[in-house]
Amino acid sequence: MNREELFNLIREKKSYLCVGLDTDIEKIPEHLKNTEDPVFEFNKKIIDATLPYAVAYKPNIAFYESRGARGWKSLEKTVDYLNKLDTKVFTIADAKRGDIGNTSRMYAKTFFENMNFDAITVSPYMGSDSIEPFLEFKGKWVIILALTSNKGSADFQMIKQSYGDTLERFGIKSIFRKKLYEKVISTTSKWGSPDNIMYVVGATKSEYLSNVRVWAPDNFLLVPGVGAQGGSLEEVSKVGMNSRCGLLVNSSRGIIFASKGEDFDKAAAGKARELQQQMEKFLQQKKLI
Amino acid sequence: MNREELFNLIREKKSYLCVGLDTDIEKIPEHLKNTEDPVFEFNKKIIDATLPYAVAYKPNIAFYESRGARGWKSLEKTVDYLNKLDTKVFTIADAKRGDIGNTSRMYAKTFFENMNFDAITVSPYMGSDSIEPFLEFKGKWVIILALTSNKGSADFQMIKQSYGDTLERFGIKSIFRKKLYEKVISTTSKWGSPDNIMYVVGATKSEYLSNVRVWAPDNFLLVPGVGAQGGSLEEVSKVGMNSRCGLLVNSSRGIIFASKGEDFDKAAAGKARELQQQMEKFLQQKKLI
């Protein structure tokens, strides 16, 4: 799915909601546990229920890997189900991978070729040749960790770079000291374009969103941290939205585990609808719909 | 396996060699391809042949994931085989994971509990709460990416931190501007100890090894990049070795794909033996054996 198609989908559904499929077998309703593949059954029902309100789905790979080969089967079936829906959706493998070239190439093959995800989250720490193999896949996206939603993000992402480095270039953007997350965005954005690179920026870090937009005015941002982690959808939308929306706001636990009963899918739909309705309002305020 | 046991194993085998099981199905000998699980058959033969010369084995998870559920089965069988050997070996999941707390906990469970690896490689970008869940497992190790062997490592790992940050502390180590990889080591080393934290430092970066030893005098270093990537075992050993050896030097392709014929295991043993013999010499020079 290209950027224009994603924007069209957002306008059509009046939503920029991404549903995080962090499907923890311990937390899914009891009545599903006797089915052949409880994780897949759960995902299918969540997807069906939230489909009117969501444009993207993001399986969190850790939760599938933790169940070994069985978990991989559930993951493969889930992405296959997402790819065969009547309504096209944007699919994200939340994998946070990144390794030397030949290894990143294997990861890219796994998620883009074998499973046909639209996008994968990657860590920038190992630099250009750890990300480029993903960018070689036409029509696919990398979503680079920039400023994450967790407390520990301050440990390294907020480190200030010395003058010595930033003065190497003389553009207006370079006369202040960049923090690492800004350096990550300004550097990596040259490796691709807003048509194949997005950034992860936590909703809990909305005070930095205007900085992010200095370096990535046109890129889509994947924004986790609304809900369970405490970020504000309103603030994120006000500061982060651009002329193509440019936001995918993720909610995982707040939607998929809204109820533990047999009505879990209806409860999930209710939570997704609440977020969609707020999003519709923000899209209207920005005159995008 | 604790640090003393690892050091004893190194003295016993006169080797600090780690064999990287980057088992690419495309590259394994033809005659194995008709077996039920070619990847596992290949690994088993490589392990048996190199066991006299190696203290550690490091499956590269990308190569298993790329084959989906089948690949996970090969991985599970491989680590199970390693754990049941008569001679104990140190097992490393080369996974480069790292995510918010609840997700890192799932990855830790996967690799430490379900598969019983001794260690896992992790990316530091997301900070403390992305690494702590791994450190909570008693007797297990995290191996944090510090200065990697690839070209792109210069993009971010070599960024200089501003004076403003480093002058916050007044110890002797803090009066020069740390590079990001140094900051990563100096910060993360406080989250655990040399008994549960190692660092990845590429053999291609041996000129920085003495800096690494300023911040991590006692930690083991996992050193990839000897062989196919061009790093020198001699330089790494001279600069990096400490009083408990403190080095695990990895070779993957150089050993496991030394021959594509039916003699692939013998060829692998030959290459492993070559490295072991050099290592024996360096251990003697350091008076560790």
Image (tube, coloured by chain):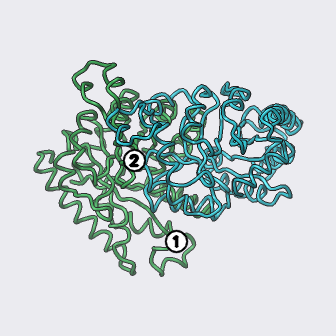
Chain colours: A green, B cyan
Residue under label 2, please give it.
A155
| SS state under label 2 | helix
The residue at the point 27 percent across, 18 percent down is A170
The image quadrant where one finds the C terminus of chain B is top right
Height in image: B146 above or below A281?
A: above
Mark earlier in primary sequence (1, 2)? 1
| Subunit of label 1 | A
Who is closer to the viewer here, B174 or A87? B174
Question: Circle 1 — which element?
Answer: helix
Q: Is residue A81 visible?
A: yes
Compared to residue A285, the image places residue A211 above or below, namely above
Q: Looking at the picture, how far across and down is residue A157, in whole percent? A: 37, 43
Disc 2 residue crowd, few under 14, some 14–19, many 20+, Cα 10 Å: some
Amino acid type, residue under disc 2 in the picture: Asp
Question: Where does the image place residue A249, in percent across and percent down from the top left?
Answer: 29, 53
As measured in the structure, the alpha-carbon distance from the residue carrying label 1 to the one carrying label 2 is: 38 Å
Query: Which dot marks residue A38?
Result: 1
User: Taking B285 as reference, is A150 above or below it?
Assistant: below
Q: Amino acid at mark 1?
A: Pro
Viewer can see residue B23 = no
Apparent side of residue A204 relative to residue B239 in the rendered image (left or right): left
User: In the rendered view, does B53 fall on the left or right side of B24?
Assistant: right
Foreground residue among A19 and A240: A240
Measured from the top left, where is residue A2 in percent x and y? 34, 38
- Which quadrant is home to the N terminus of chain B? bottom right
- Viewer-closest of A141 and B107: B107
Please tell me how crowded label 1 is: few (under 14), some (14-19), or many (20+) other residues with Cα within 10 Å: some
Q: Is residue B16 left or right of residue B158?
A: right
Residue at x-position 39% and y-position 80%: A262
Q: Chain of mark 2?
A: A
Q: Are marks 1 and 2 on the same chain?
A: yes
